[in-house]
Image (cartoon, rainbow, N blue to C red):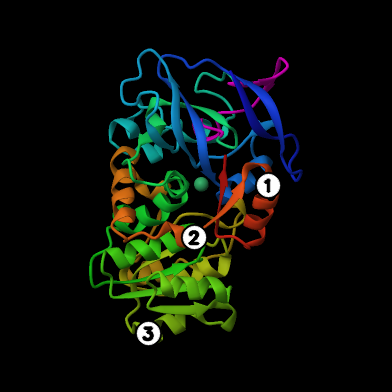
């Protein structure tokens, strides 16, 4: 089968749309005709950590085109969102925690199926696909039965796309990882898709105090409109003290989405005793950074790392779609549409922060 895909051949060089050959689906695989796909920050740094040439994209939404012989959950014609891959056999998958699949890193970033075979080629030359078991910067993408989720009929595909990663990460961190309680307080560092989705989820869960922290006044205003009760510009300094001026004993929850070292320290320092900080990213791709752990010890505070908002996509993505359809998750406030042909501009706008959530349309 032929697919038109955005191929990245070198880190730092914009992808070029090329005509590739896509593998025939195996028994448990699914081919999706993309209608839309979001651009997430992971797509921006992936070329520096993944084998190249490769096709990225991991928030695909579209219509099932073909299915393998043993696929039962979806049929051709079904509208689906594509999400992260998981093996279905390890102890984490068996424990209903697919976001922590023991093969997760290889399945998202390895550029191949679980057995190492590649699914894309260009005149016989292998091209790495299977990014998050989808590589959705393409007109057709090959996924597995485990990482396609059927959508309710009235859910627009353009808005469903970011449910596959960014929105489920932010909302899931509040609703599933932290299990934030109504009436509690939260500080969210970084007002990108993940942070803003966390804020929308915090409003949905009726938290009383929702503090957004960012360095972009436009994003801070958007955070207010989406549910933040307070918005702090980190450039004004002393963020933890300013949070304590709002909630004197500190906030019960914080979420760090910005990858800034100062934000990480502030996200710990602003917590109440026994408060919990969720990390959804780390500074400098995991390089050592100075953080003060004493506040954790002195107040019984907790620091926890979260992947994909602890999502079980089959359960959580339909819940998020229902929230959107009930007006509780206005994803359309985050998205900006681009034609697939403009992927270079969309990636540049994501990198520069000009768009919160670019969504490519096919
Ligand atoms: Zn697994
Ligand atoms: Zn992502």
Distance between mark 1 and mark 3 Cα atoms: 43 Å
User: If you read the primary sequence from the N terminus, does the residue marked by circle 1 or circle 3 appear first?
Assistant: 3
Left of 136 or right of it: where is 121? Answer: right
Residue 108 image point, x, y percent: 52, 35
Residue 86 image point, x, y percent: 41, 31
Would you name the residue on which mark 1 appears? 342
Residue 334's mark? 2
Would you name the residue on which mark 3 appears? 246
Closer to the eye: label 1 or 3 = 1
Distance between mark 2 and mark 1 Cα atoms: 18 Å
Residue 96 image point, x, y percent: 29, 36
Q: Is residue 214 above or below residue 320?
A: below
The quadrant of the image that shows the C terminus is top right
The stretch drawn in magenta includes residue 330:
no
User: If you read the primary sequence from the N terminus, does the residue marked by circle 3 or circle 2 appear first?
Assistant: 3
Closer to the eye: label 2 or 1 = 1
In which image quadrant can residue 87 be found? top left
Left of 215 or right of it: where is 168? Answer: left
In which image quadrant can residue 331 be found? bottom left
Distance between mark 3 and mark 2 Cα atoms: 27 Å
Depth check, front residue: 2 or 198: 2
Query: Is mark 1 in CB contact (under 8 Å) with mark 3?
Result: no
Is residue 51 visible to us here?
no
Q: Residues within 10 Å of mark 3 (few under 14, many from 20)?
A: few
Q: Secondary structure at mark 2?
A: loop
Q: Is residue 15 above or below residue 255?
A: above
The stretch drawn in magenta includes residue 125:
yes
Is residue 328 visible to us here?
yes
The magenta segment: 119-135
């Amino acid at each position: 089968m032929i697919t038109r895909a955005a191929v990245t051949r070198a880190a730092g060089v914009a992808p070029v749309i090329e005509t590739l050959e896509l593998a025939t689906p195996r028994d448990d695989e699914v081919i999706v005709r993309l209608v839309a796909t979001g651009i997430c920050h992971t797509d921006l740094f992936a070329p520096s950590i993944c084998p190249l040439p490769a096709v990225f994209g991991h928030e695909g939404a579209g219509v099932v085109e073909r299915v393998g012989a043993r696929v039962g959950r979806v049929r051709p014609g079904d509208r689906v969102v594509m999400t992260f891959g998981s093996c279905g056999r390890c102890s984490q998958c068996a424990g209903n925690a697919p976001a922590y699949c023991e093969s997760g890193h290889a399945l998202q970033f390895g550029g191949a199926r679980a057995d190492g075979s590649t699914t894309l080629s260009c005149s016989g030359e292998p091209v790495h696909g299977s990014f998050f078991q989808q590589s959705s910067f393409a007109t057709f993408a090959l996924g597995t039965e485990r990482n396609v989720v059927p959508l309710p009929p009235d859910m627009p595909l353009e808005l469903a796309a970011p449910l596959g990663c960014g929105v489920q990460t932010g909302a899931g961190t509040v609703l599933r990882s932290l299990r934030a309680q109504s009436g509690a307080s939260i500080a969210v560092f970084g007002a990108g898709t993940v942070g803003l989705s966390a804020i929308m989820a915090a409003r949905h869960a009726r938290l009383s105090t929702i503090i957004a922290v960012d360095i972009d006044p436009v994003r801070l205003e958007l955070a207010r409109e989406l549910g933040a009760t307070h918005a702090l510009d980190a450039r004004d300094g002393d963020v933890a003290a300013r949070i304590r001026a709002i909630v004197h004993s500190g906030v019960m929850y914080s979420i760090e989405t910005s990858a800034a070292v100062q934000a990480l320290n502030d996200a710990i320092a602003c917590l109440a005793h026994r408060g919990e900080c969720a990390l959804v990213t780390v500074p400098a791709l995991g390089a050592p950074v100075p953080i003060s752990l004493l506040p954790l010890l002195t107040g019984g505070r907790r620091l926890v790392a979260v992947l994909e908002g602890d999502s079980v996509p089959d359960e959580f993505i339909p819940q998020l779609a229902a929230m959107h359809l009930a007006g509780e998750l206005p994803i359309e406030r985050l998205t900006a549409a681009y034609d697939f042909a403009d992927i270079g501009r969309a990636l540049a706008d994501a990198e520069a922060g000009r768009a919160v959530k670019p969504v490519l349309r096919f």
